[in-house]
Amino acid sequence: MKTVDEQLRIITKGVSVLVNEDELRSKLSESVKNNCPLVIKLGLDPSAPDIHIGHAVVLRKIKQMQDLGHEAVIIIGDFTGKIGDPSGKSKGRNALTDEQVSENSKTYFEQIFKVLDMEKTTVRYNSEWLSKLNFEDVLRLASTTTVARMMERDDFQNRFTNNIPIGIHEFFYPLMQAYDSVELKADIELGGTDQTFNILMGRNLQKAMNQPQQVAIFMPLLEGLDGIEKMSKSIGNYIGVNEPAEVMFKKVMEIPDKLILKYFELATDEHPDHIDTIRQQLAEGKNPRDIKYSLAEVITRLYHTEQEVVQAKEYYDTAFSKKATPDQIPELSIKSPGRLDEVIPLLVNKGFIKSNGEFRKMVQQNGVQINQQKIETIDAVLKEGDVLKIGKKRFIRIVYEK
């Protein structure tokens, strides 16, 4: 294992809030002394399994700690998912069925192990212990906190003030998530800043049950391509971990210059020393585009093979530096020649465009081409081999389904 100071430097890189550093230093010292890894907890609500690199900020931090020799335990909230996390919600959430939880969990695993080290990760379902609690256990759990404490949550306060119903069962969500920490004897729990209440509840419950308290690490929320809003698939400002390499590379090149350092800190595993060098280069006037090009290469390499990274760079250089049609571009499969308006739903589904309305507006503004010819109507017909160019940066080759 690395020294305690070196581990602290890596673990605290990009962190928004740490509760608290003295406890973390003590835990790391014991870990080094006894050659025993720390237990890092991450709870996942299996209601939204599509992961983008904003979600992956926490996963990347856990991966960095795995590289330092520690063990991660992923908690799939199959039991808590039946309530739904009320964090940031203006109303209660619909409960998930067992089938939905199972299907969403499978999708999660396919994506989280693009980041985490599978050999150093244990996956648990909190129904293993929560489903075994009897009513006396539940009452004892409820006695560890107060209604006033629960009402400190902004979402509960806002709903109460606006006369929006709050189910008593919703108060149990943070308690059940906290009980997960007790069950695991977690040393560290990570989450976004929107999970502050839930994770600190874990510390409180561990203390109430005479356990050492977990260190709480909160990662900042990552802004999307617009540089303003939190990265979100619904807004369309996201970079998906499953997107093709050329799409991922191109999207990273679109982030505002002001976010270069933040993306290096939160979306990569680069060492703090390297990030300090980049910070100095920017301060000395190095072209941000050149640094962003390096960032795009680093991020794309985290999720794709070296060959795919090379092809992504070639695609970007050809399309946006030489303004030609690249050889390696994404493909869209259609059954037979079809009108453009019939293909729009496929383009939305594959993430090439945000919406039907956006695409129609771009056609009206002469922002869409077929084989380098601008089109003026969505009645245009697409056939195999055609190259569709949307805006200045998106190329799609049409192929027939086989």
Image (cartoon, grey):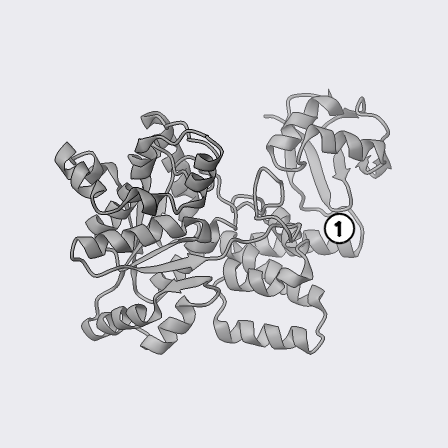
In depth, the one of 310 and 356 nearer the eye is 356
In depth, the one of 63 and 327 nearer the eye is 63
Q: Is residue 313 visible?
A: yes
Q: Is residue 370 visible?
A: no
Question: Label 1 sits on what residue type?
Answer: Ala
- Vertical arrangement, residue 103 with respect to residue 297, above or below: above
Quarter of the picture holding the C terminus: top right
In depth, the one of 395 and 311 nearer the eye is 395
* Badge count: 1
Q: Position of residue 394 (x, y in %)?
A: 72, 43
- Relative horizontal placement of residue 365, taking residue 160 as reference (left or right): right
Residue at position x 62%, y 63% in the image: 260
Q: Which residue is mark 1?
A: 319
- Among the 4 quarters of the image, the one containing residue 37: bottom left
- Relative horizontal placement of residue 305, taking residue 324 as reference (left or right): left
Q: Position of residue 233 (x, y in %)?
A: 57, 40
- Among the 4 quarters of the image, the one containing residue 390: top right
The kind of secondary structure element at disc 1 is helix
Residue at position x 77%, y 42% in the image: 391
Residue at position x 66%, y 55% in the image: 255
In depth, the one of 301 and 72 nearer the eye is 72
Residue at position x 65%, y 67% in the image: 291
